[in-house]
Amino acid sequence: QVQLVESGGGLVQAGGSLRLSCAASGRTFSGYAMGWFRQAPGKEREFVTAISWSGGTTYYADSVKGRFTTSRANAKNTVYLQMNSLKPEDTAVYYCAARSSWNGAASYSRLDYDYWGQGTQVTVSS
């Protein structure tokens, strides 16, 4: 079992930045790919970004490319989401997720992730 705890959410003006963190505990973090998803009120949970176990492969949704960056520090069992040039449409609850796969590969699909955090609210005002 892996426990995930997100932090760093909050209220920011459009154009501002936030950095989310996701700390993993419990079972070894080793080999897990990590993803970030978000869910706005009344909408489906959607993919934001994912990073492979090694950090060598990253994926981004088109809506965040060039503005968001994901990274990880495996020695700290932590993954990060740096969000710049935030827009009101980025407002959502952001979730991190862990995927156990034999090769540590990341995935776009939320169905591929085994563990989820409780989420952190990000609100971008116009």
Image (cartoon, rainbow, N blue to C red):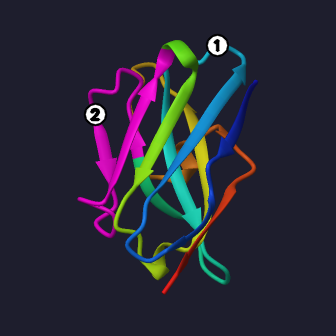
Q: Is residue 45 visible?
A: no
Q: In this rendering, would 34 be left or right of 55? A: right
Instruction: Characterize the local packing of mark 2: few (<14), some (14-19) or many (20 or more) Cα atoms within 10 angstroms.
Output: few
> Residue drawn 55% across and 28% down?
78
Number of callouts: 2
Assign a secondary structure to mark 1.
Answer: loop
Q: Residue furthest bottom?
A: 126
Front in this rendered view, residue 109 or 30: 30
Q: Amino acid at mark 2?
A: Thr
The answer to whether 117 is drawn above or below residue 39 in the figure is above
Say which amino acid is labelled 1.
Thr
Residue beneath the point at 59% across and 45% down: 96
| Residue at image mark 2 | 57
Q: Which residues are magenta?
A: 50-74
**Residue 74 visible in the displayed image:** yes
Give x and y (percent) for residue 107. Answer: 41, 43
Residue 83 in the image, given as x and y percentages of width and height:
41, 56
Q: Quadrant of the N terminus?
A: top right
Q: Tell me where residue 53 appears, x and y as whole percent.
A: 42, 24
* Nearest to N terminus: mark 1 or mark 2: 1
